[in-house]
Image: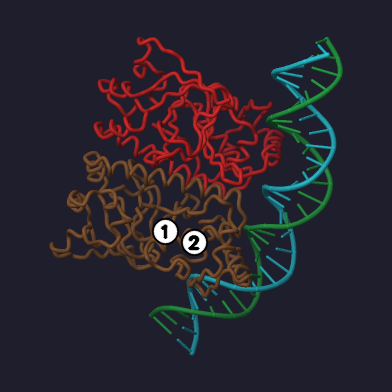
Chain colours: A red, B brown, C cyan, D green
Amino acid sequence: MAREIKLKLAPALKASCHTCSLSNLCLPLAVEENQLDRLEDIVEQGHIYNRGEHIFDQDTPFRSCLAVRSGAVKTSIITENGSEQVTGFFLPGELIGLDSLGGERYACTAKALERTSVCKFPTEKLEELTRAMPELQHHMYQLMSREIQGSHQLAMLLSKNSAEERIAALLLSLSSRFQRRRMSGTKFSLPMARSDIANFLGLAVETVSRVFTRFQNQGIIRTQGREVELLDMETLRGAIPESNRQSSRARP
Amino acid sequence: MAREIKLKLAPALKASCHTCSLSNLCLPLAVEENQLDRLEDIVEQGHIYNRGEHIFDQDTPFRSCLAVRSGAVKTSIITENGSEQVTGFFLPGELIGLDSLGGERYACTAKALERTSVCKFPTEKLEELTRAMPELQHHMYQLMSREIQGSHQLAMLLSKNSAEERIAALLLSLSSRFQRRRMSGTKFSLPMARSDIANFLGLAVETVSRVFTRFQNQGIIRTQGREVELLDMETLRGAIPESNRQSSRARP
DNA sequence: CGCAGACTTGACCGCGCTCAATGCGAGTGG
DNA sequence: CCACTCGCATTGAGCGCGGTCAAGTCTGCG
C-alpha cells in the first residue's frame, strides 16, 4: 500500500509549467514568464497516486510542498488516540504542505481521494528560490496567510453555525473552486466521502446525510451519491452568514 | 478612542533588541547576534496602547507585523452582520499579523486586553530583510506554519471536544506560555474576559462560567475573577485528548 | 455611593450525537 | 448470472450537552 508510481518522463516533457493549464492558479502565477524556467528547474512532476494512497504521512521528514495537478487530496491530523481531524481538501492548482513549511516534519497526513497527480517542490530549493524572487516570496506569504485566514473562517463556522450552514458553506466553497477551474459550479462530483465531510465540519455522518436529504426535499440541491447539483444558489447563500461567502483556497 | 500614544524615544534607546528580555522568544531568536542591528534598523518600538484600545482594524491597510512587548492582545474577525470571532490571544514575544502577511489589508482586528506595548515591523522592510537573511525567512515560514497548525488544533478542539476539554486546553496553553515567559505556570491572571474565552472556544459565556465553578468544586483549579490557580495539572491534562497537549504559539 | 459591566447561577428546551437497522452499489467468486 | 460481502449512505428513535432566557451577585470606578 501507499506504493508510489513514479513515471519516467521524457526530457522534452520536463519543462511544462509553461504549458500547464493550471499556471494561472498554481505557483507560476506569481512568476514572470521569463523567470518560469527557474521554477521548472526545481519542480518534480509526474507523481501519481491511486485513490486511497497516502501521499505523505504526519511526522515523516518534510521534504516538499506539493501542488495538485489533477484529482483531489485530503489532509488530516491523526492524534495518538487514533482520532482523525480532516484539515482540508485540495483541488488542482492548490498547494499542500504550507502547514509544515519551515518545520522538520509534516504536520499532517495527505491522502489521495481519487487518482491524483502532483508536482513536488523540494522545500530547500523552494526557500532558496523565494529568496531570489521577491514576487514569489510575497506570493508564498500570501498563500500561507490565506491558509491561516481560511482556518479562522473554519473555526468560526464550527463554533457559530448550524449543521445546515456548515454544509451550505462547504458546497459553495467547492462550487466556486470548481468554477475557477473551468468546471461547472453548479453540477459536480464530490471527491470525498460523507464521513470526510462530517469530520471536516465537526458533524456526525448521519447529520450530514440528513441535511443533504433535507436540502433535497427543499429543492435547494439534488444529490445522487457523490453527484451534486446546486439548484438554488441564492437560498444556499442565504443559509450562511455574510462571511465565509467566498472562502476558497489559493485564490490568485 | 483608539488614540495611540507614541513615545518619543531617545536615540540611545532605539537599539534595544540586543537588550530585550524577550529576544529568545521574539524574532531576534532567529537572528545571529552580529546581524541583530539589521533587525533593529527596521523595528519601531514604543507603541503603547491602553486597555480596550484598537491596535489595528480589519480591512485597514496592512502596514506592519507587531510583536507584543508587554501586556496582552486579542485578535478577532468581525463579520458584516456584526458577530465576532476571537481568533487568538497574544502574549509578550508573540507575533501578530501573520494572517495578513502578503495581503493588502489586515485580516483581523487587534485590541489591547490590558495596557500593552508593541514593536512594529513594517512589512515591506520585513519582507526585504527576510530575503537577505535565510534564517529569518525560514523562521517566518515556521511561525506561519505553526499558526496554521494552531488553527487546525483549534478547529479540532471545537469540533471534537466538550466544553470542559476546551477550557482545560486553553488553561494549559496559557499556563505553558506564561511559564516560558518566566512567570508562574500554575498561578496567573487571565488577561481576557469570560466572554472572550467563550467566543474563542465557541461556547456561551454561561457555559464557561459553569465549567470554571465545576473545576473549582472538583479541586482542579481555584478562581477568583480573573485570577486562576491550577491545582491539579494532571487531572487537567487528563481532561484533554493527547493532542493539543502543548498547543502554544511562537515556540522557539 | 450608585451605576454599569462582568460574572454566576438556575430552569428549560432543542440541535445534533448515539445507537441500531436498513438500503444500495461495486467488486468478487462460485 | 446470481449470491454474497463489504463499505458507504440513509433513516429512525431517544437523549444529553450546551445554548437561551432570566434573575441575581460581585466588582471597580467615577
> Total marks drawn?
2
Residue B25: x percent and y percent?
33, 56
| Residue type at the position of mark 1 | Lys
Snapshot quadrant of residue A65 = top left
Q: Is residue A117 visible?
A: yes
Snapshot quadrant of residue A216 = top right
Q: Is residue B185 left or right of residue A2?
A: left
Q: Is residue C6 left or right of residue A209?
A: left
Residue B40 got which mark?
none
User: Which quarter of the rendering shows the N terminus of chain A?
Assistant: top right
**Contact? badges 1 and 2 (CB < 8 Å):** yes
B3 over A60 or under it: above or below: below
| Residue type at the position of mark 2 | Asp
Q: Which residue is mark 2?
A: B196
Residue A7: x percent and y percent?
46, 15
D19 over A3 or under it: above or below: below
For mark 2, does the 10 Å Cα neighbourhood hold few (<14), some (14 to 19), or many (20 or more) residues? many
User: Which quarter of the rendering shows the C terminus of chain A?
Assistant: top left
For mark 1, does the 10 Å Cα neighbourhood hold few (<14), some (14 to 19), or many (20 or more) residues? many
Labels 1, 2: one chain: yes
Residue A192: x percent and y percent?
60, 30
